[in-house]
Image (cartoon, rainbow, N blue to C red):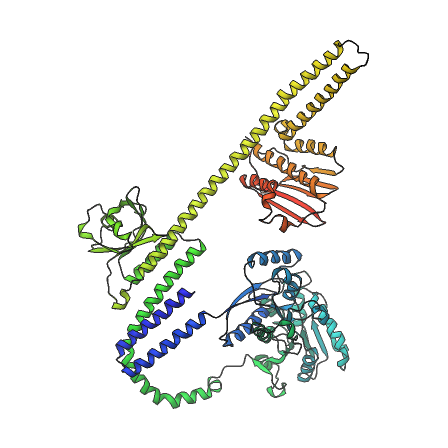
Amino acid sequence: MEWFDRKCFSMVMVVVSIFLANIGVTHFKKIILAWVVLILTSSAALSADLPNKNILILHSFHKGHTWDDSISKGIDETLASQKNLEMDTNIYYEYMDVERVQGSVHILSLYEFFRKKYAQIRFDVIIATDDSAFRFLMDYQKKLFPKTPVVFCGVNYFEEFEMFGYEQFTGVVERIDIIQTVETALGLHPKTRELLVVVDRTDTSIAIIKTFIRNFKHFRDPTMFHFIGAQTSEELRQRLAALQPGTVVLFVNFTVDKTGKKISMGDGFKKIIQDCPVPVYSFWDSYLGNGVLGGKMSSGSAHGRMAAKIALRILNGELASTIPIFKESLNRHMFDYKLMQRFNIPKEKLPSGTQLVNIPFSFYATYKKLVLSVVASIAGLSLVILALVVNTFKRKRVEKTLNYYTNQLNLLHRIDRAILAGKFSHEITWEVLQHVRDLNACRWASVVLFDFKKQTATLAEVNSDSGVRALTSSSFPISEFNPGILNQGRRVTVNCKNLSASSFVALTFPDDRINHFTCIPLISNGKLIGSLNLSEATRSYPHMVEIDIFEEVAASLAVAIQSVNLQKSEKRYHRDLERLSAKVFEMQEATCRKISFELHDEIGQALTAANINLAAIKKLILPDPQQRLPGLVNDTQAIINRLTEQAHDLSLNLWPPMLRDFGLESTIQWYLRRIGEKVNIQLIFDGSDFPERPAQEIETTLYRLVQEALNNVLKHAQATRVDISITQKQNGMIFFMVEDNGQGFDLETTLSDETMNDRLGILGMRERIAILGGKLDIWSSLDKGTCVSAEIPWQERK
């Protein structure tokens, strides 16, 4: 950003210098303009040192939602209108989208998303709009944004006692004016016999119905109120279309019909009331313009402006705990002028201070003073225009140069964005060369990369009038580009008349007859990697543009190309690492099988033979009066038996032969029976939906996963039940799950980077499954158990 500011101010200085040199102003005017430039530069330098303030605006709904957009408008207008020279603000917008996506899983997903996204960003204040965002921050603010002040607005269900323990919270409470809206409607429609209240089954509607009931005492005839029960949107549309004069509709809330269908505040609402023959009132200005006549309405923009004012007070140093919650009504009477004409309501009957919308446009009435001022000023402006015509041609020259620099900055900005996004490609290089050609007015531009070992220059990309791209990747002698001079950071002009018929220019552009082309070095980290080549220009520019921007373009291109090369190297090393890991696991399994066979076939047979020999010796020993020698033989036989059993168990644990002979399902059932004989844990296995045998690598990996998971359960979980299941999904994926009802653990702490070095078993499982193209997921919660699951693509057994 600082680099960009310096570039902009340098351009201002240059443009002003050209302007002064060409319009022939007096020495006195030059001094005045120089002072103006100095003041602008100083102000910019001061602004660069201002502290940055980060503001997070968390909306409950989605972008495009009328209420949220209205609040955003109020916030933006207030922040933009504050000419605060003591800070720079960075505004972040987030949308919870709870109207379209609901449930605790969605809230937890938002928490995880915000935790990762803003782990490195500290906010100075957070503005929460509507109840969902407010409740979310009450639950997670201390975890996500500790010690960050929160300003809420648009909150309906607010109780003072809820703020106990939330000293960092303040804001604006939303109140709906039922009494004044109803009284206004009855005053404008004195023949009203029925007030039809439209609600749905949501918590918002239930809360408002309760508010209606509490306010019945203020009305002369509460029996006028009728609440429409649960209906579909079509049923409600027909019901409203059939209403007779003498009825007024109070449209409170209808976002979900009785079938669960979502009703948008825009088109959905319009369709419902489009055929309604009686006036419709509401409490929110977001309904205006969609068929609602009016009411004492809550304004989203008003709430946004008030919340932004409180946020600015906090940013200027006030503590949130010292700012009282704003509980006064921000509502105002608002009416739709077109619907007033339809229902014959004169403006004089409206409450004072009423705001009207959809007023027919009258240019003279709207701009009366402006029209008179324009007429009075035409004569004077004519004189000014006459004076300005003299300078028009000179100003065009300055504008042309300014556009030139603007295009240069846009080009550099595009390259920088591509580098930061890691998406630099041949297509972007081609577009950059197109911009370079537009700036320099040359017939072609190209990028070549050098290979000093082979002494060749490879054509990476070319952009030309003829559209030549077929020779990309062609190689030429590196000497044609004078790398010795380029390596010094200097540009080289190559005379085409001295080149052979097989040169770079002759082969790439055989139909272009040019005298020379310019090579600009591509240097990254002090190393020459290639050159940016430009043919001679077809038109000239003023002398000031000779300060060539293309060296900066070449520097950015060098960084981008080097970045792409590094990414390719990283991917290649990653693939090599995966192949090495797969080979390590393959060798590990082969070693386990070998040791298992040797334990079973060699050591086990040797121990068995020794045991048989001891038994034979025992029979041949003469009776000993003290029976000591036979006792020693018995002890030796017992030791050999234990060793034989241990060698057998060790052989099976290393690699059970039945995995090869009978498959994964039988091996897991056998393994669970062995474990069940040693521990008091209920072990349940379900493999009924797994009819076929996959590849040997998959069976081995899933068996190791069972071993590792059960080993962790026995060591740490203190569980009484473990469920293991394996299924084959319709999409060809193998789904495997091990779940226990043990004490669980804190997943975030246990799997953090600081402790993962001690969790080699988990790392091994993840690596094995990743090699097979699968994914391992671990879920755990304190006192709720642990679930380890894996998805692996099916592979046929060879």
Give the residue displayed 75% in from the left and 38% down from the top.
681
The answer to whether 273 is drawn above or below residue 382 in the figure is above
In this image, 244 relative to 8: left or right?
right
Q: Nearer the viewer, residue 617 or 538?
A: 617
Looking at the image, can residue 200 be seen?
A: no
Q: Nearer the viewer, residue 514 or 615?
A: 615
> Which residue in the rendered view is the most extreme toward the left?
497
On the image, the x and y values in percent for residue 586 come to 54, 32
The answer to whether 196 is drawn above or below residue 381 in the figure is above
On the image, the x and y values in percent for residue 250 come to 68, 75
In this image, 767 relative to 247: left or right?
left
Looking at the image, can residue 12 be seen?
A: yes
> Which residue in the rendered view is the most extreme toward the right?
625
Q: Within the image, what quadrant is residue 339 found in?
A: bottom right
Q: Nearer the viewer, residue 165 or 560?
A: 165
Q: Quarter of the image containing the C terminus?
A: top right
Q: Within the image, what quadrant is residue 164 found in?
A: bottom right
Give the residue displayed 44% in from the left and 86% down from the top.
370
Q: Count the marks.
A: 0
Q: Within the image, what quadrant is residue 453 found in?
A: top left
In this image, 516 relative to 787: left or right?
left
